[in-house]
Amino acid sequence: MTFPKPLNFDHQATTPVNERVLSEMLPYFTEKNGNPHSSDHIIGWQSSGAVDDAARKIALMIGADQDEIVFTAGASEANNLALLGLAKHAAHGPRNRILVSAIEHKCVLEVSRVLSEQYGYKIDYIPVDNKGRIPEDAFSALLDETVLAVSIMAVNNEIGTIQDIEALSKAARHAGAIFHCDAAQAPLAMNISTLARRTDLLSLSAHKMYGPQGIGALYIRRDLHDQIEPLIYGGGQQNGLRSGTVPVALCVGMGAAAELICEADSTGARNLLRERRDNFARKVLRLNPDFHINGPSSSSRHPGNANICFRGYSAGEMLNAFQPRLAASSGSACTTGTPELSHVLRAIGLSGDDSESSIRFSLGFGTSEQDIDAATGIVEETLTSLSTELADTA
């Protein structure tokens, strides 16, 4: 049995690899397949040069230097290296508190749990308002000379909230804390050309910005290199911060994706994406006056994100009914399948019922007006079908 190609409204889970990115990667799977750490011959030198060039492009995207980029297997590993690496090195020191926002990615929350249970750190969760924003006064009240690090994501992966990283990092640094930012969702949502200057540690993921899966990077401010304990030991690659042979083709792909973001009319692309997202949201909300958007206003969120509460309906039943025509999600792809309510929706004050009725739709740069009309039609058909079933069983 064959099915039509589904409409992809789950771009925050992963983006397709851009064709130019793929074309730049392909030679490094075949004729340019040298080990970049082989230092005795031309093939190794060429591969090493390709990795260095990729790091340079990523550094340029965020306003850093090439030697401040460490390649990882993705943003989850980058987040682990940043927080575990820093905290393990500073264990038993005078700064024994770590501040983490209440709506961080699950991997950051899990690292925080490990740091509390295994290393004795006190974890304080920074509250957010009903739009997912961190109130600066509440944040400042948590800062003092005992705080080692602060971890706040630039753009939320479920409700799309864009934080004021400049103001938050300024407050953290003023208190002497190290500022870590999970910026996996940021490249498509905002201008990040100076983000490295506002952070000390910054995590990125290639597959969130039209690059390949399986590769990410951690920006580590140069003077912090000796304060990060590695998670992976071995041959001492990447200045000893992350041993192991780096995957050249994937590094090249991430570099190419970063270069595209720097070259393209990113502002124009984001504005168009925002217009199409708003159009989709308007059409869906017209279907029922009880439906509403979770999170901040259009201008303060990821331009492709529409997290919608279908009050009175089950998100799980709707997502099942969408198949195989429409792909969306009930939250982060990293927590899909877990029998618990979204911690992000709970943190912004949604009830259990409204959380269970919420679906994240995330559009991409390739989402067309025709896709929006088709997706809205599928949503409407699904709601009509589910309403009929409820009426029949009443």
Image (cartoon, helix red, strand yellow):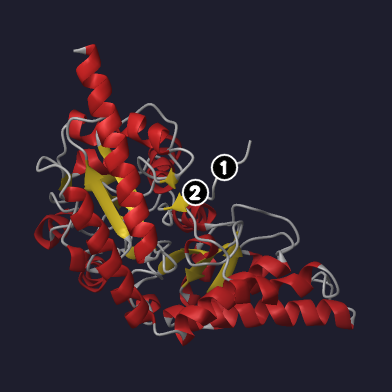
Above/below status of 386 relative to 249: above
Marks 2 & 1, CB-CB < 8 Å contact: yes
Quadrant of the frame with the N terminus: top right
Q: Quadrant of residue 12?
A: bottom left
Residue 332 in sight = yes
- Tell me where residue 261 appears, x and y as whole percent: 46, 79
The C terminus is located in which quarter?
top left
Residue at left 23%, top 41%? 345
Query: Can residue 363 be seen in the rendering of this structure?
Result: no
Q: Using residue 12 as the reference point, say whether residue 159 is left or right of it.
A: left
Q: Where is residue 64 in the image (x, y as percent from the top left)?
A: 46, 81
Q: Is residue 3 above or below residue 303?
A: above
- The one nearer the camera, 379 or 275, is 379
Q: What residue sits right under mark 2 in the picture?
A: 6
Distance from label 2 to label 1 (Cα)? 8 Å
Please provide percent x and percent y for residue 66: 56, 81
Q: Nearer the viewer, residue 212 or 85?
A: 212
Q: Residue 101 in the image: x percent, y percent?
A: 27, 51
Q: Which mark is residue 3?
A: 1
Q: Which mark is residue 293?
A: none
Q: What element carries label 2?
A: loop
* Circle 1: residue type: Phe
Q: Is residue 359 above or below residue 240?
A: above
Residue at horizontal 54 percent and vertical 47 percent from the top: 4
Q: Which residue is drawn at 58% across and 65% down?
A: 17
